[in-house]
Every structure is written in C-alpha cells, then in structure tokens.
Image (cartoon, helix red, strand yellow):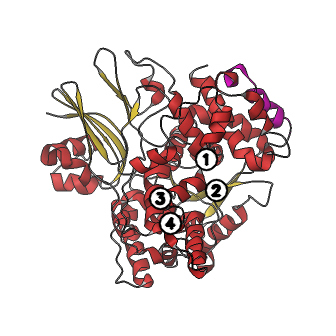
Amino acid sequence: MAKVREFGGYLANLEKLANELGIKKATNEAVIEAAFEKWGLDFPNMLNGNFYIIIDDADKVIMVRDRFGARSLYYYLSADGKLLCSTSIREMIKKEGFVKEFNPDALELFLSFSYLPGKDTFFKGMTKVMPGEIIVWENGKLDIKKYWEASVKQNTDISIEEMGKQIHFSLMEARKDWQRDAKVRGNFLSGGVDSGYLTALMEPKLAVSACYDDPAFDESPMAQETADTLKVKMHRFKVTPQEYFKSVPLAMEALEEPLGDASSVVFYMVAGEAKKHVDVCYSGEGADELFCGYHAYVRRIKQIEEAKAAGVDLKTLPQVEDYYIGNTRVFHEEDKKKLLKDYRGKILPLDLARSLYKITDDMDDVTKIMLCDLNVWFEGDIMLNAEKMSLAHNLDCRTPFLDKRVVDVALTIPSNYRANTEQTKLAFRTAATHLLPESIAWRKKIGFAAPTRAWMCEEPYVSDIKKVLSSKTAEQFFDTKEVLKMYEPENIDNCWRKIWCIYVFLVWYEIYFG
C-alpha cells in the first residue's frame, strides 16, 4: 500500500475529504493515502490548499506540488541513478549522492528577472517540481504531467456587481476551511485592499504591519485606519536600516536561492515579529495575480487606448510578452555581456517566460499579462518569498485567496472587470465593499515597498555594499569596475535595482558556495 513519505503545508478541505473517504481520524497522511487509493494519480485534483507531497508506492516515487507552488519540492538524479527529493535545498545538498555545483545559466536569468523562474535552480542538476505538477519516478525514469493549469473562461454575460458577489461568496465559503486549527490568528496588514479585505474575512486577533520613518514608504497609518474600522488590534513593527541590512544574509540563507525583491527582507523580519504573537498568519498572496492588481495592466491599457486615439495600427505595438518582460526586466542582454566575465546567453528570458504558459491569438492583452503573472512571476518571486520567510520562523502562513473555489471564480472574470486606464482589480474591489468601506476598497495600489534605494545611499551601508561588490567572489563573476560605476551618485537612481540584485546574489553565494 502507498505511504506518504513527506507532506508539508495545509489542506483546507482535510475534514471534508476525510468524511467523503470514511476516515475517522483526519490526518493529512491518512487522507492523502486514501485519496490516492481511490483516485490514483488524479488525486491532487481533489486537494485544496498549499502543499507538497512525496509518496512511496512499491517501486514508484510520486511527487506532487500544489497548483501555485506555495510549497517547494526539488529533485535530483545522482550519478548512481538514485532519486533524491526534498522540500529544502539545504537538506538536499546534504544528501548522500548529491554533488554541489553552481549553475551559471541561473545567474544570467536571475539578473534579467531578479528571481529565477522555471524548473531549474542555482544548483546543477537540482530541479523544481513545478506548480500543478505530478511526477512519477519508476524504473529509473521520470513521468512528468500537469494535473492543473490556469485556464481563463471569461463570463461576459454578468454585471460587475454580480461578479463581485460571486467573488465574495466564494471567499465566505472558503474562510472557515482556512481557519481550522488556528488558535491565535494573525494577519499581515498593509494599506491596500488585499490585506484589508483578508483581515475582514479572517477576523484575526492581531494585524501586523511594517512601518518606516520615511512617510513616503510608510503604509502603517492607512493600515491603522483599516484596523480601527474593523476593530482589530494592530501591531506596528518598525523596520530600521540597521536591522534591515543585518537581516539580508539571514533572509538569503532562508530563501535558499537569491531573490532581488528588496521587500523580501522586510517580509522575513515581519514574519519573525508575527511569530512572537500568533500561531497562524494570513497573507494576501494571489490577489494581485488572479484579480490583476499590478500597474502593468493600467500602463498597457493606456498604451492601447493612446494608440487607438492616434490612429496607430495596434499590430505595430510591441507584443505583450515583450512589453511585459521589458517592464519587469532588470538587466538587458547587452548589460549582462558587459558585466559578466563568462556570458553564455544559452537561455534568453523571453524564451523561458514563453515556455511556462500558453497564450493564443484570440486572448486580449490583460489575459496574456495575467497568465504571465501567474506562471512566471508568481512562483518565482511571490510564493517563494511567502513560503521561505514564514518557514524560517516556523510560522504557519496561509493564503485563502488561493482556495480552489476562489480561483475558479477569478478565472471567469471578464478583462474589462479586471483593470482600466485608472484602476486595478475592479471586480475584486467590488467584492471587498461587502466588508470594507469604499474609501478602503478603492484605494489606489501602493505596493509593499521598502526604502532600500535611499538606505543604499547612506553610510555605513554604501561602504558595506561596495566591499561585497568588489570582493574576490564578485571578481569571479563580474567586471567589478563596471559594477561599481553603477553605484556612483549620478547613476544610483537608475541602477539601484541592478546593484541590489548583484549584491544579494553575492551575499547568497558566500553562504552556499563560499
């Protein structure tokens, strides 16, 4: 009989599945084993939650990752033909038969995206089970299949008010399943609609918010307004540059692969603070991706409207994939050729992005961008950040917006209810007004940003970063003179993200390969 070797995460429908399968003692392992016995390799479709699973079934090993990659799973084929698998890179590199080698192609892609999308890792031969995948290892061979992928089916015969009701109903239906066994509930709260709506839904004991001395980045006053409206106690955690830079190596070690998202260090710090007060903390991952919350949507819609007004043929505009990757790109190929001592160019970022999702000519641009978000950015940056930073502090971080019922509704939203030339997440904001005042539900998106660029211009951080950028490790990979030129005062405004990506990569490399 098949046995669960490893399970990690949270099954929102654990109790419902246990009842359906006739299991009295509802453990994750017992339910998964019974589900596998009943439905075979189709069993992941019956699961709802954040998880990774490794099952031993006679001479087979079965690896499964949830639909959006909320929990990581890696595998590696050793020289003697053994399959090694783990949810942790740090554990994987300790396994007998694993040979630790750096993957230089990963660095080139990382410099383009500021994260590493796709199945490869920074370790040669170590591969990710991708979101929505089930992999069977048998007789020395891997059989890789997708059991789920996002498929958009727009419901154009519905009003935005009714769409909002459907979204809200799905969340109200899901919330109790995500509250199970959460003794002391918390919520990450910023000034935006996502975390505000989630706080209203999950009714936590405490909301935790980061705050800064710089008012341009400090969303905590707006978060406090939301908390007061919902009568939820709020804990403000002040992030200082001293503690921020002290946390950079800790965050890179926890991430296990470098991440150039400067706000990830703040997430690491806030997750640690939340753990002091709560057992479970709810987070809004998925709202921006499923409901279209990024400014890229507004920019693209404006570009199309302006082209129409000017009589420009829309076919002459950059393709949406080129446009989108261009907007999010950190380094261009010419930049990398100039900076890297061993530029290879084997995998181009646009080719990689296109390999991760399918688009068709009949799709509108909003849908295309959304699919790129869900399949490239979401797993590579957002979910990695939420998973690794919460696990670093043994915090149970749950993401109700990724509930299967909510996702099914989200994929039916018409594009004109997603974004327009002024605002994002139109249908989602309409849903949020069922629990939030309109002034909060319709706030403009600010984004979870940190004052990293400003701090990088202050001492002692300038000297500390330059020391890393000119180190012997840096000289292995980069023309350090060219790198340091970007750090000159006249260049820092345009180059700070480039500098940050190189800096965190070097910090990470010293931890894992130094």
Assess disc 4: are there few (<14), some (14-19) or many (≥20) residues with their C-alpha within 10 Å of its C-alpha. Answer: many
Amino acid type of the residue tagged 4 in the rendering: Cys
- Which numbered circle lies on residue 286? 3
Q: Which sits in the foreground, 415 or 264?
A: 415
Q: Which of marks 1 and 3 is nearer the N terminus?
A: 1
Tell whether position 462 is magenta: yes
Side of 273 where 482 appears, left or right: right
Closer to viewer: mark 3 or mark 4: 4
**Residue type, numbered disc 2:** Phe
At which x and y percent is residue 261?
Answer: 62, 46
What percent of the width, then of the height, locates residue 191?
65, 65
Of tags 1 and 3, the one toward the viewer is 3
| Dot 3 amino acid type | Gly
Residue 484, image x, y percentages = 78, 34
Asked whether residue 257 is in view, the answer is no
Observer-nearest residue: 219 or 322? 322
Looking at the rendering, in which quadrant would you find the C terminus? top right
**Mark sitting earlier along the chain (4/2):** 4
Q: Quick one: label 2 or label 1, which is nearer the N terminus?
A: 1
The quadrant of the image that shows the N terminus is top left
From the image, tell me which residue sits under label 4. Answer: 292
Query: Can you tell which mark lies on residue 448?
Result: 2
Q: Residue 57 location in percent, x, y?
A: 18, 32
Q: Name the residue under label 1.
A: 267
Q: Residues within 10 Å of mark 2 (few under 14, many from 20)?
A: some
Residue 63, compared with residue 356, is above or below; it is above
